[in-house]
């Protein structure tokens, strides 16, 4: 498919200050403003919450607290049967600093904040636990007493002769690794407007939120409110100031503000401030993990063991434990490993609950797997590139032991291109020069399989197969699209993918224009969301790189149906068989005689104005809805195998770092990044996604980490302590390239590309630092890495 590089239609309004974010909208008259009272304690029993002074404050319309929440709401439905009920506020206890306790609704934010300070909370402090390892200890403080443990889910899976392979291995290579808790820190924090209405058909909730799916959360919210999903209407504005997953999990604040609206009798608006966001919004899961590989004498990995423990924070908030299972089908990465054993656990601690963060599941998995491959290299005395090349999947489709089916690729070509572009001999020469001068220089490699078009059925793996109810299985990579043509031949494409800046409108216009033979200016895209009118399914949303493989495929289907009707109408005008016509250059023309043509808009006009002239059997409509549902995506099998994504791309990354011998400050010197995302739909957007994912990965590799004192108090709740990379930190030499292996499973051959380097860069960076410090014998087992960490490692080593 030809490269599409029209200007991004999203940019103009944003750079001229005409974006329409939720704070810019005022959809309901009489909307009041809320402030949230939050816990100052990491773990405490609520002996009492006195709301009386706040309720008496002038300008306050309503104040709700634990009593109102318990009386009106049900716990959110969870993905597992763990006895760990989750409400939008603390009820019996608070379990992390920042957990909501009460909501004050007033005439304005100033009044609401003043009144919030009058809420009196009587705490009974309890011991806190913040480390996932500590949470597993038998004497650890329990967050949820009825559960009897801090383990929210614990499953073990085994495929192939794992024990035999380890018994016969020439080498058993092991490693224990820690991946940090960090976030996306979007420019725009959470924002909600909610309106509770009581009617003859029962209560209804209409809400506006900068939420971007998946819409599996709509029934979760409906379950908490005790209303049918048909009585919840959710609007999402066209402009969302970033998310990268943080706004894709459950929005407990939609439910909380709906309840506040019920008590105030008015619509209620709440916008999160930055401190609230850093305290209590959502963050990617931190993981402690242990990997072991059975390795032959020549460096072939024959079996893999993975013990994964995710810290989900105070509650296993839906859609968790997604992070544990999102990469289940690609647990072996790009390697031919025939036997696998996995233990997957999620534990609760007195920290902010986790959710989705760009590359979720993949960041954590590949940090362990690719550090392990470096250890395999060291154990067998082979070069880090060669030991990886020896184990790469070489033919496609390839089925992993856990059920993933890699659709296409050329991993060897991508690795060779990344190494070539990196100029490895030159980097090794720089390393030799640095070491001769008493400095540190290292080169690291990271290879990842990049899943896209997620199958939500993987969440079912958290439940043992014998406990899954027949007929209640889940699968899904469905996306809906609606395409319509007006009487002047202008095309509208309505998307349910709720983007946050990725350029969905630009690409959807280009795809529809090409399929209909139109200039792109004749097509417009609508991306704002209304669950009452926009086509969507429970899997809809912008997450797990779904747009390129799934949404564009639905656009193709809908546009092709429109094209068939337009050809039939043009056949009437040209007195020619529809099958002999083609759409191109804004015309419908005879293939054998292109001069004989009619304008697209005239053919479309006939359908609107003179439908009686259409051939028998031709639908008199230019309005098509398509749902792309790939047959390759099924529910988990009874033996716990699942193809957890539709498509699997590939990333090969080489990272070179320099470490100042005096300050131990780390600087990235060069990055060579090669991506195979199938057919490239828009080179500019693909390049932007690569650059963004690299920067996101850089944040987790060097700067960003949510930290807590042993007492449970957060120690990174402002930007003074939670550091994010800026443009200055990305001023390294970057060499990007692409290998194109079209997917046979999507009409355009496209795969996702939005997450790859966020998964590969952190571990490639860690491998480079480990290579730089190899003469000092310093082990690298965790992120982030910066001068302070290196000082401690060198002192302890």
Image (tube, rainbow, N blue to C red):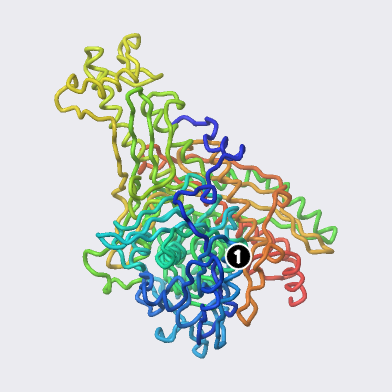
Does the image show residue 380?
A: no
* 240 w.r.t. 346: above or below: above
- In the picture as drawn, the residue positioned furthest to the left comes out as 616
Specify few, some or many for label 1: CA neighbours under 10 Å numbering under 14, 14-19, or 20 or more: many
| Quarter containing the N terminus | top left
Q: Residue at x 52, y 60 (%)?
A: 33
| Quarter containing the C terminus | bottom right
Q: Residue at x 46, y 72 (%)?
A: 64
Residue in the foreground of this view, choosing between 757 and 385: 757
The image quadrant of residue 144 is bottom left
Q: Position of residue 253 (x, y in %)?
A: 47, 64
Residue in the foreground of this view, choosing between 433 and 79: 79
* 155 w.r.t. 735: above or below: below
* 565 w.r.t. 688: above or below: above
Number of marks drawn: 1
* 756 w.r.t. 303: above or below: above
The secondary structure type at the circle numbered 1 is: helix
Q: Position of residue 777 (x, y in %)?
A: 72, 70
Does the image show residue 124?
A: yes
Instruction: Give the residue number, with chain letter if any, for mark 1.
Output: 278
Q: Position of residue 201 (x, y in %)?
A: 25, 60
Residue in the foreground of this view, choosing between 577 and 523: 523
Q: Position of residue 743 (x, y in %)?
A: 40, 42
The image quadrant of residue 710 is bottom right
């Amino acid at each position: 498919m030809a490269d599409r590089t029209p200007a991004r239609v999203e940019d103009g309004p944003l750079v001229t200050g005409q974006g329409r974010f939720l704070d810019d909208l005022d959809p309901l008259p009489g909307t009041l403003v809320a402030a949230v009272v939050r816990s100052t304690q990491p773990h405490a029993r609520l002996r009492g919450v006195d709301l009386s002074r706040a309720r008496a404050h002038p300008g306050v319309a309503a104040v709700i607290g634990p009593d109102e929440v318990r009386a009106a709401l049900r716990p959110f439905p969870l993905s597992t049967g763990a006895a760990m009920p989750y409400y939008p506020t603390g009820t019996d206890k608070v379990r992390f600093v920042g957990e909501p306790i009460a909501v004050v609704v007033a005439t304005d934010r100033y009044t609401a904040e003043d009144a919030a300070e009058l809420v009196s909370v009587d705490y009974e402090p309890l011991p806190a636990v913040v480390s996932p390892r500590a949470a597993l200890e038998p004497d650890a403080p329990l967050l949820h007493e009825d559960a009897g443990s801090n383990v929210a889910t614990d499953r073990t899976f085994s495929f192939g002769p794992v024990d035999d392979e380890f018994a016969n291995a020439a080498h058993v290579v092991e490693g224990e690794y820690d991946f940090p808790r960090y976030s996306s820190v979007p420019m725009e924090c959470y924002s909600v407007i909610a309106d509770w209405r009581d009617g003859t058909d029962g209560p209804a909730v209409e809400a506006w939120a900068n939420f971007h799916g998946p819409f599996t959360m709509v029934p979760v919210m409906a379950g908490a409110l005790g209303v049918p999903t048909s009585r919840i209407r959710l609007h999402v504005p066209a402009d969302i100031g970033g998310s990268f997953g943080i706004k894709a999990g459950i929005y407990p604040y939609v439910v909380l503000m709906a309840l506040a609206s019920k008590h105030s009798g008015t619509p209620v608006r709440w916008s999160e401030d930055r401190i609230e966001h850093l305290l209590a919004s959502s963050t990617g899961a931190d993981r402690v993990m242990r990997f072991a590989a059975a390795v032959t004498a020549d460096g072939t990995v024959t079996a893999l063991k993975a013990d994964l423990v995710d810290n989900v924070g105070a509650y296993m908030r839906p859609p968790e434990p997604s992070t544990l299972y999102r990469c289940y089908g690609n647990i072996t990465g790009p390697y031919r490993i025939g036997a696998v054993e996995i233990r997957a656990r999620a534990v609760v601690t007195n920290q902010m609950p986790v959710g989705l963060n760009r590359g979720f599941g993949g960041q954590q998995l590949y940090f362990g797997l690719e550090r392990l491959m470096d250890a395999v290299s060291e154990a067998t005395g082979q070069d880090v590139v060669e030991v990886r090349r020896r184990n790469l999947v070489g033919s496609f489709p390839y089925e992993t032991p856990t059920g993933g089916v890699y659709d296409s690729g050329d991993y060897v070509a991508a690795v060779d291109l990344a190494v070539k572009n990196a100029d490895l001999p030159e980097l090794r020469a720089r390393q030799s020069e640095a070491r001769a001068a008493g400095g540190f220089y290292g080169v690291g490699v990271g290879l990842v399989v990049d899943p896209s078009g997620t199958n939500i059925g993987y969440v079912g793996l958290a439940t043992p197969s014998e406990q899954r109810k027949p007929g209640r299985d889940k699968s899904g990579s469905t996306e809906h699209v609606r395409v319509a043509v007006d009487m002047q031949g202008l095309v509208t494409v309505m998307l349910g993918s709720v983007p946050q800046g990725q350029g969905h409108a630009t690409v959807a216009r280009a795809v529809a224009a090409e399929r209909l033979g139109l200039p792109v200016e004749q097509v417009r895209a609508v991306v704002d969301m209304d669950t009452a009118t926009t086509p969507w399914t429970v899997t809809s949303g912008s997450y797990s790189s779904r747009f390129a493989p799934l949404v564009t495929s639905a656009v193709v289907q809908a546009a092709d149906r429109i094209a068939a009707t337009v050809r039939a109408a043009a056949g009437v005008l040209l007195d020619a068989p529809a099958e002999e016509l083609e759409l191109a250059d804004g015309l419908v023309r005879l293939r054998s005689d292109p001069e004989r043509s009619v304008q697209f808009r005239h053919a479309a006009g006939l359908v609107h104005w003179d439908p009686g002239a259409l051939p028998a059997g031709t639908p008199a409509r230019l309005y098509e809805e398509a749902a792309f549902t790939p047959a390759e995506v099924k529910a988990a099998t009874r033996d716990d195998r699942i193809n957890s994504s539709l498509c699997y791309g590939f990333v090969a990354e080489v990272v070179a770092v320099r470490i100042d011998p005096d300050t131990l400050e780390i600087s990235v010197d060069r990055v060579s990044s090669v991506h195979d995302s199938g057919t490239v739909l828009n080179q500019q957007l693909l390049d932007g996604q690569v650059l963004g994912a690299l920067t996101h990965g850089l944040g987790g590799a060097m700067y960003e980490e949510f930290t807590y004192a042993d007492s449970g108090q957060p120690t990174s709740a402002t930007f003074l302590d939670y550091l994010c990379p800026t443009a200055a930190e990305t001023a390294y030499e970057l060499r990007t390239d692409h290998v194109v292996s079209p997917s046979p499973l999507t009409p355009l051959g496209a795969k996702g590309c939005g997450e790859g380097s966020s998964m590969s860069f952190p571990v490639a960076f860690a491998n480079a630092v480990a290579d730089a410090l190899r003469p000092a014998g310093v082990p690298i087992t965790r992120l982030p890495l910066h001068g302070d960490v290196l000082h401690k490692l060198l002192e302890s080593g």
